[in-house]
Image: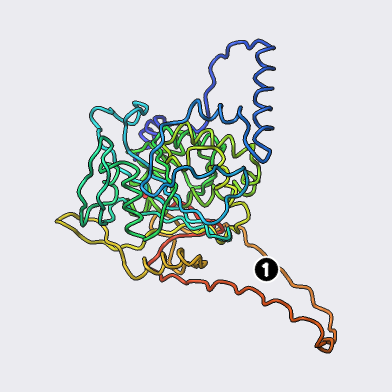
Amino acid sequence: MSEPSRRSRRSQQVSTIARHGRLKKSHPFKTIARFLAGALAVLLVSGTAVSAYAFWDIAKDVQPSVTLANETPGVSIPNIDAIEGGVNLLLVGSDSRAGQDGVFGDAKKETGNLNDVTMLMHISEDHSAATVISFPRDLFVPIPSCPKEGGGTYSAMTSQKINTTLSYGGLACTVLTVEKLTGLSIPFAAEVQFNGVIELSNAVGGVDVCVAEPIEDDYTQTYLDAGTHTLQGMAALQFLRTRHGVGDGSDLGRISNQQVFLSSLVRQLKSSETLTDPGKLFGIAKAASSNMTLSNSLSNINTMVSIAMALKNIPLEQVVFVQYPNAAGQSGGQSGVLPLKTPAKQLVDALVADQPITLTGDTGAGSVIDPNAPVAEAPVAPEAPVTEAPAPDASTPAAPATPTTPEVVELPKTVQGQTAGDYTCSKGND
């Protein structure tokens, strides 16, 4: 490509830096009032429960919620603290253009409603580990009978691509499908569209990503040189959407590229202590509630913040991003990917038993290990003083047994992914 052509094309991409126009002069009393209102909101949500103001501020912008098949009505809302017990939450990214900015295409012409991103987050019962499973959009799965929004049901299907489930009953159908595939109960779910991803990336202040080789994708207007980039707003969205610009140009390569972004996001949230700060989490929850479709069980700030706080003490090495085990195949004359049943069962059984997992496979087609990743020095244990053990005393009760550590499940090399402790870079495909 010639240099003038490259410059011309790059000028079309969306800048990661906001351009500010002329601002109206602000009345000093209005400015003070807005500042006090913002400060009051942070103070109110920093206690053990959310005040009426915080509820109003969230509720006025909240999107209509969705009822899941396994929701229990009347369950009490937790206080702002780490949620008790384990969590299974499904996050769906829709490619629908309905209600979105015209830059993403004509909503009348592009009428599809596909879940091109489907991710299940599992937090263990004791909050010692978290696993995020990405399901390839072209994964052939059985789809159960799903309720129609206007009444009635869609018929069950033995083998369809998982990204069609939004078309058969919306978010609730995607949840039912993943429950059938994994055997896990999923009480929380959220659906996000393009604008929602933009606002959420703005709420966290952008994410630093490493690019090993230049990314050049005309489809998403994503052009990134090798190096580290802070992505926010439209640039973050297009990075997460790019498929042709990374790895082998496939959806599987896009998944591993998304995991580069997500693992960096987790490191950033933990290093900035966002996950321990209810005030910061309030801002993210507000962005989520006004830009996402949430299940009824998730459509309140307490629950959202409580789930986020459950991640605060999990070591980076125990936050694992995996691609659902798959292999290329066909079903009904269509090409796609088929589940690898044995490694998939190993993965899901480990989650059900709350056993920690370790990866032996590579990071996937869209990413590579960062050669400049910081190397953590192994801690040197101090030498213990040599002392003689006291003679046993029959009158002293025996010490309680030390709880056993769950056995670590080593997944086969066919399972690709990374941990949040792995520093990785996107692998460009120009």
249 and 99: which one is in front? 99
Corner quadrant of residue 37: top right
Question: Which residue was labeled with disc 1?
Answer: 378
On screen, 385 above or below 118?
below
Q: Residue at point 66% right, 16% down?
A: 31
Query: Residue 148, percent across and down?
Result: 26, 40
Query: Residue 399, percent across and down?
Result: 73, 78
Query: Residue 254, percent across and down?
Result: 37, 50
Is 107 left or right of 316, judged from the image as shown? left
313 and 104: which one is in front? 313
Q: Residue at point 51% right, 33% down?
A: 287
The residue type indicated by label 1 comes to Ala
Q: Residue at point 43% right, 36% down?
A: 292
232 and 183: which one is in front? 183
On screen, 153 above or below 140?
above
Corner quadrant of residue 95: top left
Kindly tell me whether residue 91 is visible in this rendering.
Answer: yes
Q: Residue at point 57% right, 30% down?
A: 55
Query: Residue 23, percent across and down?
Result: 57, 14
Is 40 left or right of 355, judged from the image as shown? right
How many residues crowd mark 1 within 10 Å: few (<14), some (14–19), many (20+)? few
Q: Under tag 1, what secondary structure?
A: loop
Q: How many labels does the image show?
A: 1
Indicate the colouring scheme: rainbow
Position of the N terminus by quadrant: top left
On screen, 180 above or below 234?
below
Kindly tell me whether residue 370 is visible in this rendering.
Answer: no
Corner quadrant of residue 367: bottom left
The residue positioned farthest toward the front in the image shown: 74
